[in-house]
Image (cartoon, rainbow, N blue to C red):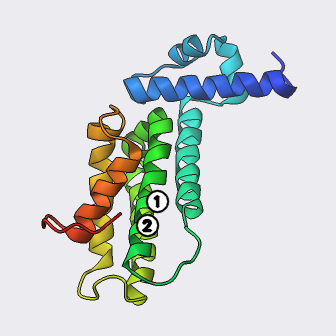
Amino acid sequence: MAREKGAKGKESRLRLLHAAARQFAVHGFHTTKVSSIVGEAKLSQPAFYLYFESKEAVFEELVDMFRTSLQAVINDSQLPQQESGQHSILDQLCHTIQSMFEYFYSHPDLTRIGFYQSPDADEIKMELVQGIEKMLRMEQRNGNLSTDMSMELVAECLVGTIERIIFTQLLPGTVSAEQLAIHIVRLYVSGLTRKQSKV
């Protein structure tokens, strides 16, 4: 069976990716079968093997898609340089976290696969910690954050919070990405005191 070319071939491959993402997210890697993926995609099993060598190959590609897209979201979330000050770090943190939440909400299946099911999940989360820590350290050097706090620890706590909030609040649609970002930044910047920083 020859591989389909052009737009039709791309469409079939994309359908298989979407179907695989759905099946893996709902049933997990080990339970999901190629037959269930092609059934979801409404394609034949031979068609699957035109584009992917195995179930493992399509799973790895989905993880890579999540990893690459998440890094791009973080990189693209950098706001234009503003005058130094506490207000700018609040804006930047909110914007970065909101951008991530919007991506997670728009790609729930990939999020479940890349953030939780993948053998690389811990490594992906560590990359996220390092990206946030880098941003926080820059603001710390600029005098916008306390110097007696470990930015590595803060970044670890932020990612732990984000990881939990994704499934308890974000994906169920309980709270919007924007409101979640504001609440999280207020918590980490102002704590639980009555006086809140304006975001």
Image position, residue 17 (x, y; %):
61, 29
Q: In the figure, is residue 134 to the left or right of 54?
A: left
The three-letter amino acid code for the residue at tag 1 is His
Residue at 50% of width from left, 37% of height from top? Answer: 106
SS for dot 2: helix
Q: What is the quadrant of residue 81 in the picture?
A: bottom right
Q: Position of residue 10 (x, y in %)?
A: 77, 28
Residue furthest right in the image: 6
Residue 6: percent from left, percent from top: 86, 27
Determine whether 73 is above or below 56 in the image: below
The C terminus: image quadrant: bottom left
Neighbours of disc 2 within 10 Å: few (<14), some (14-19), many (20+): some
Label pair 2/1, CB-CB below 8 angstroms: yes
Q: Position of residue 56 (x, y in %)?
A: 53, 34
Q: Place residue 174 in its image quadrant.
A: top left
The tag on residue 95 is: 1
- Name the residue at 60% across, 16% down: 41
Q: Is residue 30 visible?
A: no
In the displayed structure image, the side of residue 39 where residue 191 appears, left or right: left
Q: Residue at x 51, y 29 (%)?
A: 21
Q: Quadrant of residue 93?
A: bottom left
Read off the residue under disc 2. Answer: 91
Of 135 and 180, nearer the camera is 180
Q: CA distance from mark 2 to mark 1?
A: 6 Å
